[in-house]
Image (spheres, coloured by chain):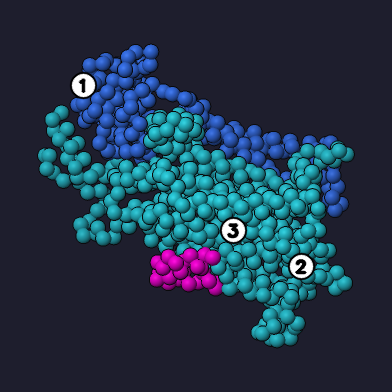
Amino acid sequence: MSNEPTPPPAGFRPGELSLAREALVLNNRSFSWVTEKVCGIVEGPAPKWWYVATAASALLALVCFTLIGYLISTGVGVWGLNSPVGWAWDITNFVFWIGIGHAGTLISAILFLTRQRWRTSINRAAEAMTIFAVICAGIFPGIHVGRIWMVWFLAPVPNSNAIWPNFRSPLLWDIFAVSTYFTVSLLFWYTGMVPDLATLRDRATNLWKKRIYGFFALGWRGANRQWRHYEMAYLILAALSTPLVLSVHSIVSFDFATSVIPGWHTTIFPPYFVAGAIFGGFAMVLTLMIPARAIFKMHDLITPRHIDVMCKILLLTGTIVGYAYLMELFVAFYSGNEFERWAFLRNRVADPFIFGPMFGVEPAPYWWAYWAMMLCNVISPQFFWSRKMRNRVIGVWIICMFINCGMWFERFVIIVTSLHRDFLPSSWGMFHPTWVDMWTFIGTFGLFMFLFLLFIKFLPMIAMAEIKGVMPQGDPHHPSADEAEAVHLQEYRG
Amino acid sequence: MKGRVHAIVAEFPSAYALYRAAEQVRDKGFRRWDCYSPFPIHHMDDAMGLKKSPIGYVVFLGGLLGAVSAVALQGIPSWLLYPLIVHGKPTNLFTLPAFFPIIFELTVLFSAITTIGCLLVFNQLPRWNHPIFNWDGFRRVTDDAFFLAIEATDPQFSETRTATLLSEIGGTNLTVVREED
């Protein structure tokens, strides 16, 4: 009896083993290998490049905060805003960053509910990225009127004349959406991290590390009576975050869609913004994870399959975004509304070489921004139809950089090209960013990278407990041969 | 270790072995016992004879409270205190759709906070220490070890017979964990 092999799972037919899915963790690693690998990054001494990169990004973040101080002490005149273009880089940057945040919640919530188990090796870093991106985004609405002391007008409290803010305004909806999104993402990220913080606590050699990780691990014991509530709480948070992530960028798009500005007044905006956000967010996840994977040699945890799947998501969402761009053009044409037609053809599409001469119109002042967006967001992800391209890590990274730029241009095109030519030609103007505009934006990248570098040094970058659960030996129903033998032996004796 | 016995802990070699052991301890009718693992083991609740976590019901109430708060937060100023006419649009119950986004957001926010609250309350966390941590070997539970502990408060507990049972069902590394004195 002891030599009897384990019965194969139901539905198994011999000779079909090659059809089994590729393992999520390569090279048959053990549980302790995963612990060692992930905790090793936190526990080992920080490499030299980490100090250099952290110092450089801290410096950039400092530039951002200094310029915010300059803006507040001087006034919004230090930015390039002018009379037709009252929203420019500030709101562009806000939408850009908040969009990047969407991939983290998509990976942690939607892919969790749809049982996409490959998410486990990237969800922690993607969620961290979400939180840091939302922090960067949150800066801009706070400072965009240049009068920080009026920021309490954003809150749902009556002003000194006892007038409450207009609850039917998308701008107020936005406050609720973004702050709820930040809070829920933070709770979700932290809840997911508690078991891994307990791992760090149990491995800590130094008293203070033990205390600090112990404090945040909340006394986690890994008991099944705890896991039972934990798994339910995680499921509920995922179920709450899924409609939340879709609502946030929909509400951001209402800021534009409920106005009467041609180019903004578009019913397609909510799904188009959400697809764009996921698209831009996944590009940013890959932008960060590809170097991190190479630097920390995590090729067995973040496998070519992970990159391949993420590229497919980029291809899908990029194509949805492309469809939305074309549908916007079609609806502008089909509406017969001359202002809509003008906004799309004469303010965006008409380039000096092909479409301008074709339609016999002057080139649009911002044609270069529109076509940069088209090239980066619609053309560049089409390379991912090819498996060869999806497997070429450096190529993937370069395309992701194109997408990062493209998504910024998308928001710039939507915001600035719609505003710069008002209904009357007497109130037309161009937007020219100042050095303050530029360095504030560059500075937010410093803040983002600074927070991310602190994260990879002090917190477990990969969700160890989740990875262990999807490894073959984590499945309680498929014992390895040795274990099956031990159990059978036990039954035989008993 | 001195002091009162807290529990007898046995180690099992794998998730599979722990699962099988849990089924047997469940069938013996123990009540105060637990399985410890580095990750949630699929279907372990069935093996331990535990019911579904009731967190969802409490979260529903939390969400409801969020929705009601959002209606009150928006309705009281907009319909009662200071109706604000913007673009000549009325402020009455028929304008409810314009209040939906905030109702949705606060429902989600309150539900999420309730979820975390329930997680802490139901698990009796946070707590600084627990008797089971008095055994140094236990710290591997967050790495790659699988334990089953039968606590001394269980009516069927007996230091000798429980230990024999645990070793019979495949437990190794049997340890009597005591509470601190």
Q: What element carries label 1?
A: helix
Residue A235 pos. (x, y %): 48, 41
Magenta span main SS? helix
Taking the image as shown, residue A225 lies to the left or right of residue B72, namely left
Residue numbers of the magenta segment: A378-401
| Magenta-drawn stretch contains A177 | no
Disc 3 element: helix
Mark 2 and mark 1: span between their CA atoms?
A: 81 Å
Q: Which amino acid does label 3 sit on?
A: Ala
Mark 3 nearby-residue class (10 Å; few <14, some 14–19, many ≥20)? many
Quadrant where the C terminus of chain A is found in the figure: top left
Chain identity of mark 3 = A
Which residue is at 57% across, 70% downward? A376
Q: Please report contact status of discs 2 and 3: CB closer than 8 Å, yes or no.
A: no
Locate the N terminus of chain A and report the quarter of the image it occupies: top left
Which residue is under mark 1? B164
Q: Which mark lies nearer to you, 2 or 1? A: 2
Residue A431 - label: 2
Residue A396 part of the magenta segment:
yes
